[in-house]
Amino acid sequence: MRILIAEDDVQLSEVLTEVLTRRQYVVDVARDGLTAWNLTEISAYDLIILDVTLPKMNGIQFCQQLRMAETKKHQHLKGAVPVLMLTARDTVADKIVGLDAGADDYVTKPFDLEELMARVRALLRRGLSTTELTLHWGCLQLNPSTHEATYADQLLALTPKEYALLELLVASGRRILSRSGIIEQLWSADESPVAETVNSHIRGLRQKLKAQGAPDDFIQTVHGLGYRLK
């Protein structure tokens, strides 16, 4: 899952990035509201962690603009991005303003990191129905909650990036994923992987799947275009 952190406190954003990345989330960071807004225009996020007092566009303005844009796209009832708002203000009035702007949850600084992570997990779970808690493709089964994958009931020993790539392939069905599209989905904006990095992960996945009985072409190469599942 991809998370946007909109926070102008460099130290705090770095701590949050480290903690979330360690938990296998893809993280982008914006230091001001305008940059955060521009990132939402080019990337789809599963969660936005939003500071109230951002420069250029504050968190309240950002959240209002986000919800207005979702309403125009008919995403106000389903598909809206969860927003976790961060603020140093601890009054009821401030919380009401944030929630009325469209925030889903509100955390006051300073906060306990483990509590924040619990709130992150809770917001991410809201968009999952019971039918989405496991992903299936033939003999392959993925559990997004535990980041575990099995083939023919045999556990696959995957790296975090291999699991994320396999989950992306399953979620995409028969749609072809280009190497550049895979990089955009699975690596953060400040990373610079090359196409060969994707190829290397695909090779690793194929070897591990084959070892559990999957056919050689379970992950198909569509020459000149990218990859998809058979």
Image (cartoon, grey):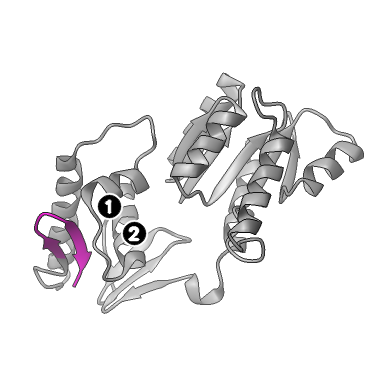
Looking at the image, which residue is at 23% across and 53% down?
178
Give the main secondary structure of the magenta stretch.
strand
Kind of element beneath mark 1: helix
Left or right side of 146 for 36: right
Classify the position of the C terminus by image quarter.
bottom left
Type of the residue with mark 2: Leu
- Which circle marks residue 162 in the picture? 1
Counting the numbered discs, the total is: 2
Disc 1 crowd rating (10 Å Cα; few below 14, some 14-19, many 20+) is some
Q: Is residue 66 above or below residue 58?
A: below
- Taking the view exactly as shown, the residue that stands out farthest to the bottom is 138
Q: Viewer-proximal residue, 53 or 147?
A: 53
Residue 208 at x, y = what percent? 17, 60
- Which circle marks residue 168 in the picture? 2
Instruction: Tell me the distance, in whole angstroms, between the alpha carbons under discs 1 and 2.
Output: 10 Å
Left or right side of 73 for 61: right
Residue 218 at x, y = what percent? 16, 70
Give the mark, 1 or 2, whose residue is nearer the N terminus. Answer: 1
Q: Is residue 15 above or below residue 162?
A: above
Disc 2 crowd rating (10 Å Cα; few below 14, some 14-19, many 20+) is some
Type of the residue with mark 1: Glu
Image quadrant assignment for residue 55 = top right
User: Does the segment drawn in magenta span residue 39?
Assistant: no
Residue 64 at x, y = what percent? 71, 44
* Residue 119 in sight from this viewpoint: no
Looking at the image, which residue is at 13% across and 66% down?
210
Residue range (magenta): 220-230
Q: Viewer-proximal residue, 88 or 118?
A: 88
* Residue 226 in sight from this viewpoint: yes
- Which circle marks residue 129 in the picture? none
Q: Is residue 9 above or below residue 193?
A: above
Image quadrant assignment for residue 228 = bottom left
